[in-house]
Image: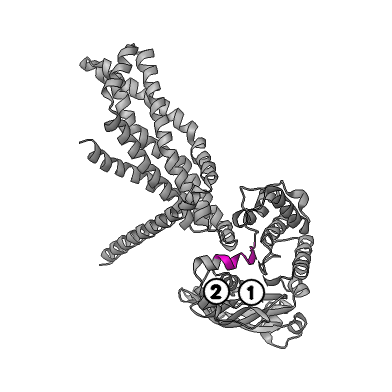
Amino acid sequence: MSDAKTERGTGEALVEIRNVHFARGNRTILDNLSLTVARGKVTAIMGGSGCGKTTLLNLIGGRLRPESGQVLVDGVSVPVLRTRDLFELRKRMGMLFQNGALLTDLDVFENVAFPIREHKRLPEPILRNVVLMKLETVGLRGACNLMPAELSGGMARRVALARTIALEPMMVMYDEPFTGLDPISKGVIAKLIRELNTSLGITSILVSHDVADTCAISDYAYLLGNGRVIGEGTPREMQESSVAEVRQFMGGLPDGPVPYRYPAPDYLDDLLQGVRT
Amino acid sequence: MNSLRRLGRIVIDSVEGLGRASLFFLEVMSGSRKLFRRFELVVQQVFAVGVLTLLIILVSGLFVGMVLGLQGYNTLVKFGAADSLGLLVALSLVRELGPVVTALLFAGRAGSALTAEIGLMKATEQLAGMEMMAVNPIERVIAPRLIAGIIAMPLLAALFSAVGVLGGQLIGVGLLGVDSGVFWSQMQSGVSFHEDVLNGVIKSVVFGVVVTWIAVFQGYESVPTSEGVSRATNRTVVYSSLAVLALDFVMTALMFK
C-alpha cells in the first residue's frame, strides 16, 4: 500500500483516470481514457450501450485491471493494490448495481445488515437501529421484513442503496440506476442520489444513458464514445454543445455521427444479386 | 490433420480446466479456515444440502435394501445359503451401494441445486455485489457449501446403508421367512469394522469432496446467463456421476484386494 500511496492525486479529485487502455480480446473497450471525479460532487458518465461505462466502474472498483494507464482513488493506485488493501479500500466505496444485486435468501433488514455484520462487531440492538436508520433514509423502514422477491424494481434499488451506504462510504458508484424504472421510481432514486450526496458529503459517480434524469442531478458530466471522452462539461454546457456526437446523444437523434444503418453493401446491388441468382 | 488438432485442443482444454478447478479448490480450502469462527454458516448449508436430501436418500435406501433382499434370497437359496442374506445385504450396502448410490442421488439433488444457486447468484450480480462490499464470495458463499457437502455425504451414506439393511430385513425376514437371529448374527460376525465400514466411510468422504467440488466449481465458472446456468447444472450431474463411478472402481480395487 505504501508504494501505491506515493501516487498521490490532486486534493480536489477523488478519482483520477489517466490514459487508461482496456481491451477484451481484440476489441478495445477504453482507449487512452482520462477523466477526473471531483470530491463531493455528482459526476455523470454517459454514453451509449456498450461504450465502456460499466467497465470503467469495474476498473475504479478494482474488479478489472487496465492494460495501461493509472486508476487513482483517493490518491491510491487501485490496480497495484494487494487483495487485502483492495478490500479495505472497497469498504470506503459503495456500488449500486443495475438490478440492486440483493441477496435473495435474506430479507430486506438482513440485506442492509449484511455488510455491517461482515465488517463490524456491533451489539444487536445498535445494529438494529443503524439498519433502521439506513432504511428510513430511503423511506423503506416499513418494508424491513419483506423478501427481495416481494419488492418492486424501484424498491429493490432503494434497499440496495441503503445497503450501499451502510458502511458510510466516501463515494458511491451508481450503475444505470434509472434503467427499467417507472417515472415515479426514477424521480425517487434521482432525489435520493442528490440528497445522499449533499447530506452525507459523499462523492457520486453516476453511470447512465438516461440524459434528462442524469443531467437534472449531476454537477459535471462526461460523454463516452468509442472508449474515449467525446464531450465534457456541466449539464448545461453539454446541452448547448456544438460537437456533433454530443448533440446527437443529448438530443436522442436517430442518425448522426453514430449511423442509423449498420454498414452494408450497396442496397440496389444487394437486391439485384437475389434476382440474378 | 484437423481432427488431430481438434483432439489436441480438447486435451489442452481439459488439462487447463482441471488446473483451474484445482487452483479453485485450493483457494476455497484456504478460505474455509475462517469458518471455524463462523461455523453457523456451515450448519446452515448442512441443512440445505444434507437435511433437505434426507427424504430421497431414506426412501431410495429402503427400496434398494428391499430389492437386495429379494434378489439375494433368490440367488442364495439355490445354493442353500439363504441364511447369509443378512451378510450379503449389509456388505453390498456398506461397501458399495451406500456410498455410490448416495453420491449419485446427492449429485442429482444437492449438487445440481448448488450449481444453479451459485450460477444464479453470479448472473444476478450477487457475487459481484459481495466483492464490492469487501466480502470475499469464496469465503462467504463457496467454502461453507463445500465443507457442508463433505460433512453431509458420509452421514447420508450411513443412513442410506442403515435404512437399506432394514429394508433387506423387512423382505428377508418378514416376507421370505429367513430367521431373524440368523439374519442379524451372520451380519454381525461377517462385517468387519475396519475392512468394510471404515472403507465405506472413506469412499463416501471422497465422493463428498468430489461431488461438492464439481458442483461449486461449475456454478462459480458458469456463464452468467440462463442457458449458461442450465449447462453448468447439466455438467455437474454428468461429471459427478462419472467421477463417482470411476473413483469407486479405483478405490474398490485398492481397498478390497
Q: Quadrant of the N terminus of chain B?
A: bottom left
Mark 1 residue type: Gly
Mark 2 residue type: Val
Q: Which residue is mark 2?
A: A78
Relative horizontal placement of residue B234, taking residue A235 as reference (left or right): left
Front-lying residue, B32 or A250: B32
Q: Which portion, as a residue range, is magenta?
A: A87-98
Compare marks 2 and 1 and give the one earlier in the sequence: 1
Report how far apart the C-alphas of labels 2 and 1 lie in the structure.
26 Å
User: Compared to A181, does A3 lie above or below?
Assistant: below
Colour scheme shown: one colour
Label 1 residue SS: loop
Q: Chain of mark 1?
A: A
Residue A48: give its label: 1
Asked whether the viewer can see residue A52, the reply is yes
* Residue B11 shown in magenta: no
Residue A99: x, y in percent? 65, 59
Q: Residues within 10 Å of mark 2 (few under 14, many from 20)?
A: many
Residue A41: x, y in percent? 73, 76
Residue B218: x, y in percent? 44, 53
